[in-house]
Image (cartoon, rainbow, N blue to C red):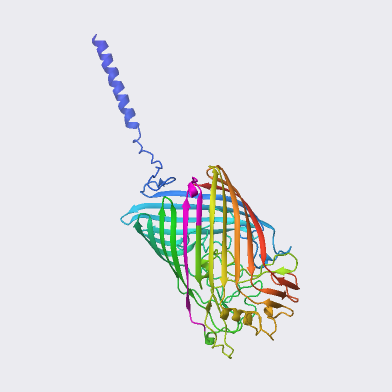
Amino acid sequence: MKMVKSLLLGSAAGVVAVATGQAADLPVKAKPVEYVKVCSLYGAGFFYIPGTDKCIKIGGYLREQYDIHGAGDGLAFMDTTNGTWTRGNTSDSSFRTRSVISVDVREQSSFGTIRAYTAFGGQQTTPNDINSALYFTRSFVQFAGFTIGRAVSFFDFFSTDPYALLSNIRSNLGNTGATGINVFAYTAQLGNGVSATLSAEDACAELGGANNGTTAGGQGAGRKCLVVNTSVAAALSPGTNTTADAGYRIPDIVGALRADQAWGSAQLMGGLHSVKASYYGSSVATELQNNGHPDDKWGWAAGAGFQLKNFLGMQGDTFVVQANYSVGAISYLTGAGSGAVAGFSGGANGLGNSIAFGNANDGVFTSGTSGTFSTGSSIELTTGWTAGGAIEHLWNPQLKSSVYGGYNKFTYNDTAANYICNGSFSVGWGRGTKAGSAAPVLTGTSGSSLSSCDPNLSYWSVGTRTQWNPNSNLDLGVDVAWNHLNSANAGVFNSGTTTYGGRPAGAFNISNYDVITAAIRAQYNFLP
């Protein structure tokens, strides 16, 4: 018995010794893996950055678009070489591939939510750029009511983007569009969905090179500074809009009062825009500092708009409308970066021997006639207005259609019109018909004449888009739009032996201009 007891005790001791040895050999227990956690503070798609209390959301989209009579961005072929419709200069269609990534980071602080947002991407457009182009559209910080960086203008209200594929139509009511604008703004929340904003914004984004550079065809995103010296020969001839701007000096000042309610939204807005020129002179070579220059002026714009949700009791239907009025600030009337801001110029409809042209600018002036050109005129500001809107109907949760459109009107006063007709068209004639005087001659070319010299012009677009969403993140759509330019000028333009904007040499009748554009798009969105 004693032997059995000794064996059992010895075995137990051995087991304990072995177990103790094994325990000594075990590694220290690992810390729990820190998995990514969902952040529900700011909506769907956010998660915590590991090890921090910051939340981040990654979004973006992939797009392929095919435009007929368009430049890949929804812009109709109507300006300069894009409007000539020759086999060597104007394509009938274009492809655009675009990929965009957005990053949205937020955290709480003693100032409330701090938000940093950026969106950047790349695109390739055939035939405009064979190689891809990198760019960014948003990059801003928001905290304590401030928005600082590249965002949308606080003047913006209506945009065709949610309702159209041809979103860069010129009658886009001055919306700063996909590429945005630089702002330094403060927004006060007044309660019950009402807010008020005061913003300093980029006044002359991407001026397009040196002063007096030919800017027809657009100057990129943002507001524009467009002042023309009508003493410069052919400054407003078909195919050109040669400006005489001063350098960047003062940002635009924008104010907006906005209400967001269950029924929709409404907004009143206004903007101040500094209008300034370089120097007097009859050519780029003579525009020197000792020539003097016109005094700076303030242009301005005002607008109002509203949006109705569930329009006429139809669930998901939307109706939106906006109207703007401007004196000396035409970029608040027409889509930025569209080329129309630089002046609807040089469009040739390709139907026989006709062309259409007109220019939209903040203002015009003329140089004096003395040797130093120091007695020129003041800047005559251009007046304009625009109205537009859209209506969208949901046929079912996967299918929707919209109709959209807008109208622009630009008017030069009698003094400005005389500067243009006497200066840019190189005749001592003036506006209208004057007994005993020769007809005005465009750009001094022999045989050119205007039976009506009137720089006023109007433009309108109307279109419809239908979109199918087989998946909530997949957009498949088609869009068709009719664009019309009404040029008040009339007569004959004779290019002589010169080809303007690629048009063959010869005589062309000046007339109105129509072009129909279409677009097909496939786009996949992930966490927009």
User: Which residue is located at x 63 percent, y 71 percent?
Assistant: 358
Q: Which region of the structure is painted magenta?
A: 293-320
Residue situated in front as seen by the camera: 347 or 312: 312
Q: Is residue 43 left or right of residue 476?
A: left
Height in image: 89 above or below 32?
Answer: below
User: Which residue is located at x 41 percent, y 59 percent?
Assistant: 258
- Residue 7 position within the rendered picture, expressed as x and y whole percent measured from the top left: 28, 14
User: Image quarter for residue 513?
Assistant: bottom right
Q: How many marks?
A: 0
Is 89 included in the stretch rendered in magenta?
A: no
Residue 32 showing in the rendered view: yes
Quadrant containing the N terminus is top left
- Residue 227 position within the rendered picture, expressed as x and y whole percent measured from the top left: 55, 76
User: Which residue is located at x 42 percent, y 63 percent?
Assistant: 256
- Residue 126 position within the rendered picture, expressed as x and y whole percent measured from the top left: 65, 57
Height in image: 433 above or below 208?
Answer: below
- Residue 522 position within the rendered picture, expressed as x and y whole percent measured from the top left: 60, 48
User: Which residue is located at x 66 percent, y 80 percent?
Assistant: 433
User: Image quarter for residue 133?
Assistant: bottom right
Height in image: 483 above or below 330?
Answer: above
Residue situated in front as seen by the camera: 419 or 129: 419
Residue situated in front as seen by the camera: 304 or 117: 304
Residue ranking furthest to the left: 2
Residue situated in front as seen by the camera: 330 or 73: 330
Is 307 included in the stretch rendered in magenta?
A: yes
Residue 206 showing in the rendered view: no
Residue ranking furthest to the top: 1
